[in-house]
Amino acid sequence: MLTSLTELSHRKQNGPPLAVLTAYDYPTARLLDEAGVDLILVGDSLGMVVLGLPDTTGVTMQMMLHHTAAVRRGVKRAPIIADLPFHSYDTPEQALANARRLMEVGADAVKLEGGVGFIPQIKAIIEAGIPFVGHIGMLPQSVREEGGYKKKGKTPEQIEHIIADAIALDQAGAVAIVLESIVPDVATEITRRIRASTIGIGAGQHTDGQVLVTPDLLGSFPWFRPSFAKARCDVAGETLRAVQEYIAECQVTKA
């Protein structure tokens, strides 16, 4: 079990691979921590799986602060990564100010989406002593611009671009990089070439770790689940059963 971000380099070299899950509230965060998960991500995916938004672009800084603080209350051991939401890091000054706000409510590191084009923002964060996690490949905050969620690394141009992003983030000092929906061979090559730990989601099995949205793992969000996510229980089904049983008991006519 990971207890500090300083252990990431050792885990990359010696294993085992990292197990990373998302949390957005106190009880889930506490359970993940007690179960032994390595890292907890307060992801802006909360926009969809908690708040019912169509994508992550409607998530605000206030939402991220609220949920990061709740997660912090439940965690004693696992390092917490918090997402910088859409348009919260348009300039280096804004990126640093908002990264500091997330750290103040309990994050151990912050994450933003993008590569070469965001190096000034990333350097501002890292130079202020804030641990930084990158996110490249498919970028959920860009879903409207790109017209959907699309696999990355299918063409030579895309491969060159993704690898350049990974190297730039690594050289800037990222402690880890999320590789989302990247062709597995490309994710494997990135993992081999950089010092930072790679955390894959829909990017094959040869990264330094894996991350999943916890409601996908638990089967608690039945309305959509990505093809690469295996539900290991059926929380939604059990919730429906329990509620319907409760309703039936409440409606029994008194003798």
Image (tube, helix red, strand yellow):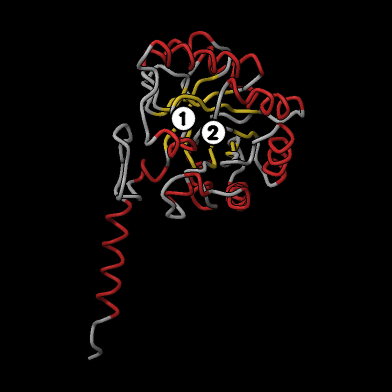
**Quarter of the view holding residue 99:** top right
User: Residue flagged by tag 2: what amino acid is it?
Assistant: Leu
Residue at image coords 47%, 43% = 45
Tell me the residue that label 1 is attached to. Answer: 19
Looking at this view, name the residue that lies furthest to the bottom.
255
| Circle nearer the N terminus (1, 2) | 1
Does 50 sit left or right of 110 as displayed? left
Looking at the image, residue 109 lies above or below residue 67:
above
Q: Which mark is residue 252?
A: none
- Say which residue appears at 39% left-offset and 27% top-offset: 181
Could you tell me how many numbered marks the image carries? 2
Q: Secondary structure at mark 1?
A: strand
Query: In the image, residue 124 lies at what x, y percent?
Result: 73, 28
Q: Quadrant of residue 226?
A: top left
Disc 1/disc 2 C-alpha distance (Å): 7 Å
Percent of width and height locating residue 24: 52, 48
Q: Is residue 41 left or right of residue 147?
A: right
Quadrant position of the C terminus in the picture: bottom left
Residue beneath the point at 56% across and 23% down: 115
- Closest to the observer, 1 or 162: 162
Mark 1 neighbour class, 10 Å CA radius: few under 14, some 14 to 19, many 20 or more: some
Cβ atoms under marks 1 and 2 closer than 8 Å: yes
Determine the residue positioned at 60% across, 15% down.
168
Binning the other alpha carbons within 10 Å of mark 2 as few (below 14), some (14 to 19) or many (20 upward) gives many
Q: What percent of the width, then of the height, locates residue 230?
A: 30, 36
Classify 150 as above or below 248. Answer: above
User: Which one is nearer the viewer's eye here, 161 or 231?
Assistant: 161
Percent position (x, y) of residue 10?
Answer: 58, 16
- Mark 1 belongs to which amino acid? Ala
Element carrying mark 2: strand
Give the labeled residue for mark 2. 39
